[in-house]
Image (tube, grey):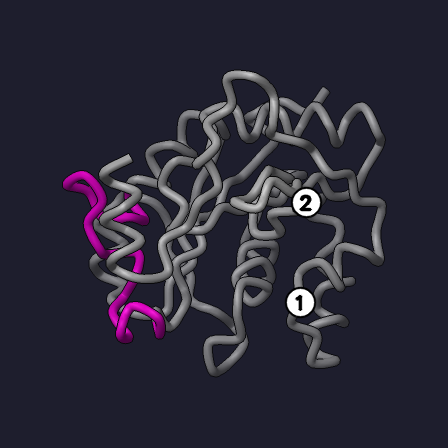
Amino acid sequence: MIHPQDITGVVLAGGRGSRMGGVDKGLQNFNGLPLALNALLRLQMQVGHCMVNANRNLAAYESFGVPVWPDGLADYAGPLAGFLTALERCETAWLVTVPCDSPRFPMDLVARLADGAARHGADVAMASAKEDDGQIRAQPVFCLLKVALLESLVAFTHSDGRKIDAWTSQHHTVLVPFDAPGDDPHAFANANTLAELQRLEQT
């Protein structure tokens, strides 16, 4: 069993927001709250510690009341840069990652990932969910990771690796399905554009 106090959560808000016209996505409002704050509040109830990974407007993110860390890799290197930054700063045995732009991720996300990791003795537990075409697919930005994987990720990113699943495939990874009756079919829907964000608010 993996206890919530042994898990640190990170909200990934370090992207360019290019498909939103270059705005800082994590600070866009969802039901009256910045997306990243919405994600943080959902995550804080599931873990012992939290941080935010952001590369712009750091003072705004610091107002959320948790540590904020920018990427150590240059040029907005993608989610794995956020993984790397958080693993470097994490003081617990496990790290869980969530993006700022999926505002309805499950309230039992961490518990189910932790159960999957513990039952399978895995180094990584990754969410999987049904998408619009009915296929169940991995959701790589929703990961529970052993912090001991830091050295491996340093080596992978220094070799210009950028894809999450290409890195996690090097380790014992279990996919945890979120397609049970009663699971929100939009739980992992993300907002890449302002129009998609408005649709998520309306649903």
Q: Which residue appears farthest toward the top when viewing the image? A: 181
Q: Earlier in the sequence, mark 1 or mark 2?
A: 2
Q: Report which residue position mark 2 lands on.
A: 145
178 relative to 168, above or below: above
Q: Which residue appears farthest toward the left when viewing the image? A: 32
Q: Looking at numbered disc 1 in the image, what kind of residue is underneath it?
A: Lys
92 relative to 120, above or below: below
Q: Name the quarter where the N terminus is drawn.
A: top right
- CB atoms of marks 1 and 2 within 8 Å: no
Magenta segment range? Answer: 18-37
Residue 22: image location, x then y, percent: 28, 75
Q: Residue at x 45, y 55 (%)?
A: 12
Whether residue 23 sits left or right of residue 100 in the image: it is left
Q: Which residue appears farthest toward the front when viewing the image? A: 133
Whether residue 154 sits left or right of residue 28 in the image: it is right
Q: Report which residue position mark 1 lands on.
A: 163
Q: Residue at x 66, y 60 (%)?
A: 164
Q: Residue at x 84, y 29 (%)?
A: 120
Magenta region includes residue 29: yes
Residue 122: image location, x then y, percent: 81, 37
Magenta region includes residue 191: no
> Which label lies toward us, 1 or 2?
1
Task: Work out whether residue 116 can be spotted.
Answer: yes
